[in-house]
Structures are given as C-alpha cells and as structure tokens.
Amino acid sequence: MSPLNDLLATPASREQSASLLELATREVFQLMLGTELSSAPPDANPHQEVTSMVGMAGQLCGVLSVRCEEKAALVMTSKMLGVEPGEVGAEMSDALGEICNMVAGNFKNKITGLGDGCMLSPPTVITGSDYITYSIADKPALEVRMLFEAMPVVISLEIHS
C-alpha cells in the first residue's frame, strides 16, 4: 500500500481527507458556478440520475465521483455555460464531467507532493437511474454530501491499494 493510501487508514486521516474533499468541492462550485454549497444531512441522497467519474492513478489510485439528480445537473450546466436550464442539451455530460475533473484535480493538489504524482483519467458520465456500480476499493469510500441550490450532491472518493 502506498503512503498516500495510508493517509485514509485512520479515522483522523479519513476526517482530514474528507475535509479536503469538501473544501476542493466548495472551491470548484464557487469558482466555476458562482455558487456557495451548504452541508447536507447525512441521509441526503439524490436520485442517482447523473454520475460523473474520474479515475486517479499513480501515488493515489481510485475513483472520484459526483452524483446528483438530473435537475441539479441541468442547473449546474446552465450556470457553467451562462444559459437557462431549459436551453441545456447534450453539453450536460461534458459540463458534469468537467466539474468532476476539476474537483479531482483540486483535491489531489491539496495533498502535499501529490499534484504531479497522480494522473487523472478523462471523465466518464452515466445518465439514467437503472444501474449499480461495483468497486474493488479496499476501504470504505470517503463521501461528502452537499446541497447545491437545495438539491443534494454526493461527492465520493474510493481508494484502491
């Protein structure tokens, strides 16, 4: 197991990593969407209609995902592109993939020495609600639950040894 993966092994390091993930997410939403996120209750689960994922490889291996309802994805895209939600079309997947990519990049850059030691994959975006994901992660995922315009968004980081 790499030393960076060890950072997630203890409750204190998991809490610190979750705080960095939350900060990275808040910064991206503020910068790219002009929106302040608020903390969501632990049971805030969106209908998983849009999931964007970015793989991480190198000193830290895993998958970062952003999950939300379609309405939240439409509003995120509209804010990112400066158009009305009703005008959003196929570019929604590109926008959500880019948001996930920016959160992953911002998170890895917050960990000393990880910026150049961890590569990001191109984003993958899944739309629809009839799917199940399986992971070979060997630790429970870090999850941050936020509210975007009063709609739940779940940011998850699954780490692989």
Image (tube, helix red, strand yellow):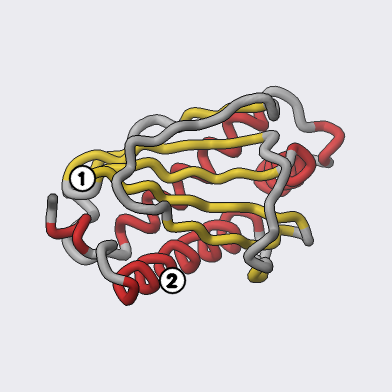
**Apparent side of residue 50 relative to residue 52 in the rendered image (left or right):** right
Q: Nearer the viewer, residue 31 or 42?
A: 42
Vertical placement of residue 42 versus 125, above or below: below
Quick one: label 2, few (<14), some, or many (20+) residues within 10 Å? some
Which amino acid does the dot numbered 1 rest on?
Ser
Query: Which residue is labeled 2 in the image?
Result: 19
Q: Position of residue 132 (x, y in %)?
A: 56, 29
- In space, the residues marked 2 and 1 are separated at their CA atoms by 21 Å
87 versus 27 height, above or below:
above
Residue at 29% over, 46% down: 138
Give the residue displayed 18% in from the left and 42% down from the top: 58
Is residue 43 depicted above or below 122 in this figure?
A: below
- Nearest the eye: 150 or 30: 150
Identify the disc placed on residue 65.
none
Give residue 43's quadrant in the image: bottom right
Up/down of 140 relative to 85, above or below: below
Q: In percent of the image, x 49 and y 57: which residue is there?
A: 143
Element class at badge 2: helix
Tell me, yes or no, if residue 98 can be seen here: yes
Which residue, given by chain and number where applicable, does mark 1 sit on?
161
* Image spot of residue 69 (x, y percent): 73, 42
Q: Secondary structure at mark 1?
A: loop
Q: Mark 2 is on which residue type?
A: Ser
Q: Is residue 82 visible?
A: no
Q: Nearer the viewer, residue 39 or 99?
A: 39
**Where residue 12 sits in the image (x, y, percent)?**
32, 76
